[in-house]
Image: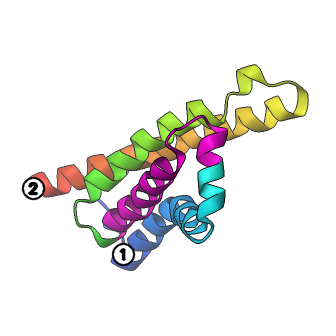
Amino acid sequence: MAIRMNAGLRWLCLLLLCAAYLQGGLVKLFDFPGAVGEMRHFGLQPAPLFAVAVIVLELGAAALILTGRLRWLGALALAVFTAAATFMANRYWEATDHERFMLMNAFFEHWGLVGGLLLVAWHDWQDRRG
């Protein structure tokens, strides 16, 4: 038996899934020099271009998910971005001691986000197919 979720509750769940991307995109937008510094830290050049791309991706894809317009595309974009960023930012296998523990937790937490985003994309794609 299928159970339908209240539309408001569904939107709240999607907002929670997008919260990190909304926060990250807004922080980068309002502290652009910090965003450029983060891109340089990860060796991404030209750093200002990558900073703009990440801001647009995080905020734009979250907006697609929350508005329902091409939700599947926004979810796939954030899933791919998160998977790539996870290998770039949470390299626990290169760390030691406490840092290793923290990075390992973040690494696997990000894979949880990827899974949630892929589920959103799959459900939206199925809903559109009818």
Q: Is residue 120 visible?
A: yes
User: How many other residues sit within 10 Å of disc 2, few (<14), some (14-19) or many (≥20)?
Assistant: few
Q: Mark 2 or 1 closer to N-term?
A: 1
Q: Position of residue 57 (x, y in %)?
A: 40, 55
Identify the residue at horizontal 48%, vertical 36% (top origin): 83
Dots 2 and 1: beta carbons under 8 Å?
no
- Is 27 above or below relative to 125? below
* Color theme of the render: rainbow
Q: Secondary structure at mark 1?
A: loop
Of all residues, the one furthest to the top in this rendering is: 93
Image quarter hosting the C terminus: bottom left
Q: In the rendered image, which residue does mark 1 sit on?
A: 6
28 or 128: nearer the viewer: 28
Q: Main secondary structure of the magenta part?
A: helix
**Quarter of the figure with residue 65:** bottom left
- Give residue 130's mark: 2
Which residues are drawn in magenta?
A: 38-66
User: How many other residues sit within 10 Å of disc 1, few (<14), some (14-19) or many (≥20)?
Assistant: few
Of all residues, the one furthest to the left in this rendering is: 130
**Amino acid type, label 1:** Asn
Image mark count: 2
64 or 27: nearer the viewer: 27
Identify the residue at horizontal 79%, vertical 38% (top origin): 102
In-image side of 102 versus 62 (left or right):
right
Identify the residue at horizontal 45%, vertical 57% (top origin): 52
Q: Is residue 1 visible?
A: no
CA separation, marks 2 and 1?
19 Å
